[in-house]
Image (cartoon, grey):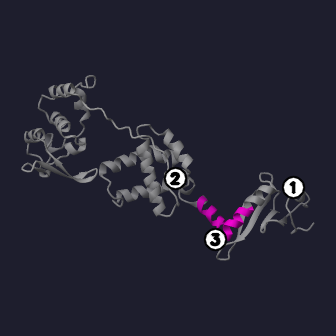
């Protein structure tokens, strides 16, 4: 049998080849061959041409790991893809040499810090960076962006802290969408993932508990007034802490907040909220100011001092 024969490749035909280099072409699938070059390893490959006419050698696998039948079926798939305009060899190279998720994350953070990602406040950026560095980068950073599967995302989500999983996956989805814009992948593997239910708290204080809270906050201090303001307004803690006198219109009884989670927001002020604001010092730009005019910051320690945890 010649060194460049064309037969239906099988185990018997390969075993019959002499020692040294040879190429055995398949008679059923055009371009499929088994060949040995300068070692004892026999490799299955398939040749095809791209739509531009370039010839490609696509390595399928080693004889012994792959059977002739498996190589023949895969070769048919490669030829079919090439006949329809694809370039499997180029696609494989891009997958193996493509950016890792860690590299994509670096680009995402760089754009975030350069204010190229719309609508992210400083506090949101800080939280996003924490989720990336503590969860996303350590567990997924080493993988090539284009090879990450939905199954990997689901496993990653199940390993996330229950209370944070939904938010982390939402951020990861945004990072992959960023990658799609950079043409690093075609589809978002987070799309279609069933995220954990949003663990929103629905409990509200009873009338008796509001009375207990009022009693505990009867001493006039800035932190206590912030807690009272939150109770009568329903605002977010950061919105109350950073409220400025310039944002308040006493005559119209409204506050216009220019930097909320949802953008500019006009909030009505109740009589109770107005009374709390009126008794604050006007020496600082912030309504609820501590020493040296700084806004109230960490409210957790003064809240613990109220010792309301067991009662409310």
Q: Which mark is residue 85?
A: 3
Q: Nearer the viewer, residue 252 or 2?
A: 252
Upstream in the sequence, badge 1 or badge 2? Answer: 1
Question: Which residue is labeled 2 in the image?
Answer: 189
Q: Is residue 59 left or right of residue 243?
A: right
Along the line of sight, which residue is nearer the eye, 221 or 259? 259
Mark closest to the chain's N terminus, 3 or 1: 1
Tell me if 58 is positioned left or right of 237 in this view.
right
Quarter of the picture holding the N terminus: bottom right
Q: Are marks 2 and 3 in contact (CB under 8 Å)?
A: no
| Position in image of residue 129 (x %, y %) | 39, 48
The answer to if 92 sits in the magenta stretch is yes
Assess whether residue 27 is covered by the magenta stretch.
no
User: Residue 262 at what x, y percent from top left?
Assistant: 28, 52
Secondary structure at badge 2 equals: loop
Q: Nearer the viewer, mark 3 or mark 1?
A: 3
| Marks 3 and 1 close (CB-CB < 8 Å) | no
Q: Residues within 10 Å of mark 1 (few under 14, many from 20)?
A: few
Q: Residues within 10 Å of mark 2 (few under 14, many from 20)?
A: many
**In the depicted view, which residue is nearer to us: 165 or 301?**
165
Q: Residue furthest bottom?
A: 53
What residue is pinned by disc 1? 11
Tell me which secondary structure the magenta stretch mostly adopts: helix
Residue 299: name its quadrant.
top left
Q: What whole-number distance in Å separates the C-alpha atoms at marks 3 and 1? A: 33 Å
Instruction: Look at the numbered disc 1 and give the secondary structure of its residue.
Output: helix
Camera-side residue of 33 and 275: 275
- Residue drawn at (18%, 48%) of the image: 267
Residue ranking furthest to the top = 310
Label located before the other in sequence (2 or 3): 3
Q: Which residues are magenta?
A: 75-95
Q: Please report the residue visible at 45 percent of the width from the left and 52 percent of the height from the top.
A: 173
């Amino acid at each position: 049998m010649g060194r460049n024969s064309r037969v239906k490749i099988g185990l018997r035909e390969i075993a019959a080849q002499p020692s040294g280099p040879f190429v055995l072409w398949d008679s059923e699938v055009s371009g499929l061959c088994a060949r040995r070059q300068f070692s004892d390893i026999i490799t299955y490959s398939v040749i095809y041409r791209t739509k531009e006419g370039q010839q490609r050698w696509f390595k399928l696998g080693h004889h012994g790991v792959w059977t002739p039948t498996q190589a023949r079926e895969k070769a048919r798939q490669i030829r079919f893809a090439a006949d329809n305009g694809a370039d499997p060899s180029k696609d494989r190279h891009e997958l193996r040499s493509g950016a890792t998720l860690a590299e994509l994350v670096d680009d995402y953070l760089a754009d975030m810090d350069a204010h190229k990602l719309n609508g992210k406040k400083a506090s949101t950026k800080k939280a996003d960076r924490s989720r990336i560095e503590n969860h996303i980068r350590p567990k997924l950073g080493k993988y090539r962006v284009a090879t990450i599967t939905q199954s990997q995302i689901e496993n990653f989500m199940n390993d996330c802290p229950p209370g944070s999983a939904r938010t982390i996956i939402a951020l990861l989805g945004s990072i992959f969408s960023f990658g799609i814009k950079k043409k690093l992948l075609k589809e978002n593997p987070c799309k279609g993932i069933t995220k954990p239910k949003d663990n929103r708290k629905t409990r509200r204080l009873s009338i008796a508990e509001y009375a207990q809270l009022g009693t505990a906050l009867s001493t006039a201090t800035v932190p206590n007034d912030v807690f009272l303001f939150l109770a009568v307004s329903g605002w977010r803690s950061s919105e109350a802490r950073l409220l400025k006198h310039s944002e308040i219109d006493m005559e119209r009884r409204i506050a216009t907040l220019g930097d909320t989670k949802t953008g500019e927001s006009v909030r009505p002020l109740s009589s109770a909220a107005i009374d709390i604001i009126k008794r604050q010092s006007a020496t600082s730009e912030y309504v609820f100011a501590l020493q040296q005019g700084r806004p109230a910051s960490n409210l957790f320690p003064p809240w613990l001092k109220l010792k309301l945890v067991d009662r409310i």
